[in-house]
Amino acid sequence: MQKTSQGKRLYLSSPTMHGDEQRFIQEAFDTNWVAPLGRNVDEFERELAAFLGVRASVALVSGTAAIHLAVKLAGVGPGDVVLCSDMTFAATVNPVTYEGGTQVFIDVERDSWNMDPAALETALKRYDGSAPSRPKAKAVLLAHLYGSPARMDDILALCERHGVPLIEDAAESLSATYRGRQTGSFGKYGIVSFNGNKIITTSGGGMLLSDDADGIAKARFWATQARDPAPWYQHSEIGYNYRMSNIVAGIGRGQLLWLMQHRALKKAIYERYREGLQGLPLSMNPYLPESEPNFWLSCVTLDPGCGVAPADVLRTLDARNMEGRPLWKPMHLQPVYAGREFVSINGGDAGGDLFARGLCLPSDIKMTAQEQSQVIAAVRSCFEKA
Ligand SMILES: *Cc1c(COP(=O)(O)O)cnc(C)c1O
């Protein structure tokens, strides 16, 4: 809800348009490619694949659709186990259920807020196919949270050693790198999202990317109603209407021109918070030294026993017309996934602990440094009262 009493609301992350988007849309109108598919779709797919450094890509209606098709490509079916990031948005893991598979949730490590390689190793050893109750894991499904890359050296080595394919959810981390390589390009399949609050947006959309060109061709087939190559409408498989439209892809081409600038602005926001919140009993969302996040959202966790709870800070922010948000509630704590297995180190629950102490701060790139100082002052005021 837009509040007007105290002026402009400071958002978590809202769309930032530049005008280039309209140029590509206009071109689609001028050529009457107001259609699903067309030049913008082809070019957007090509441009993003080149940016990530992968061979093939298919533009889709959402990141969730991209994850769904990746899960299908990995061959997940009824009874199959997929080892999933626990602390993430539900959209990462729901597609496993679409295909009848079962999620096993892997705890986070505190250094990156991403899948803990040690917990993943435990799960890979448990689901190694050695007994009917221990089917071999069909895939690892990993998200890079808030734009900070996961510990890819260890994760990739584990997936390789156990012969389990990796699906990489880079919905929040587009343009973030690990040892110089783009997130979304490490896994057998990578996905990105262009939802309204992501670092670049098409209002809604997503893409599936892979070096496996045959797999992407198969995904494209499923995404366009699985039409057999016959003179009539013939179907041998169940399909979906998952393709991105040519108008939407035009927005994406325009936004892609600004991706690196968006990232630089996001980083400046993170650095200003780190500077401005110094001395308070809290920590910023961490990242691994060998990685360069895209700093999609700046987050904090409040120190145990500091006397201030995330809800206190969120209330203070809201009263000043600033949008904050709790951290993602871990999947093993979600009612819909009650009873699913949760694998952690020594029976811990790092994700649950972060969730209890954490929150996301306004990270909108249209926020001025002066506006951000007001957010910093609002956070500081919570501790003065405490
Ligand atoms: C936004 C998001 C998605 C879903 O993308 P949509 O394009 O909204 O379907 C998936 N995973 C994560 C981690 C996300 O943040």
Image (cartoon, rainbow, N blue to C red):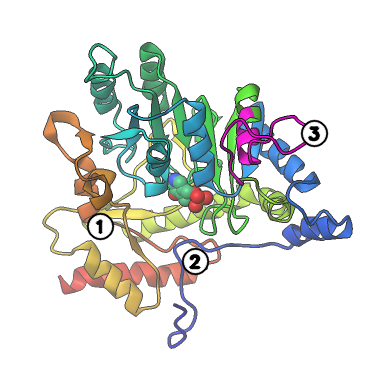
Q: Which of 170/30 is in front?
A: 30
Q: Is mark 3 within 8 Å of ligand 1?
A: no
Q: Which of 298/27 is in front?
A: 27
> Of the residues shown, which amino acid type is indicated by label 2?
Ala
Q: Earlier in the sequence, mark 1 or mark 3?
A: 3
Residue receiving disc 1:
279
Is any part of residue 295 visible from this angle? no
Q: Is residue 260 left or right of residue 76?
A: right
Find the magenta span and give its range: 218-241
Residue receiving disc 3:
231
- At x 26%, y 53%, the residue is 301
Closer to the eye: label 2 or 1: 2
- At x 36%, y 14%, the residue is 162
- At x 56%, y 50%, the residue is 264
User: Is residue 220 inside the magenta stretch?
Assistant: yes
- For the residues bearing labels 1 and 3, Cβ distance under 8 angstroms: no
Residues at marks 2 and 1, CA–CA distance in whole angstroms = 20 Å
Residue receiving disc 2:
369
User: Can you name the residue that lies furthest to the bottom here?
Assistant: 5
Closer to the eye: label 1 or 3: 3
**Which quarter of the rendered picture does the N terminus lie within?**
bottom left
Crowding near pointer 3: few (<14 within 10 Å), some, many (20+)? few
> Of the residues shown, which amino acid type is indicated by label 3?
Pro
In x, y percent, where is residue 163? 40, 14
Crowding near pointer 1: few (<14 within 10 Å), some, many (20+)? few
- For the residues bearing labels 2 and 1, Cβ distance under 8 angstroms: no
Q: Is mark 2 within 8 Å of ligand 1?
A: no
Dominant secondary structure, magenta: loop
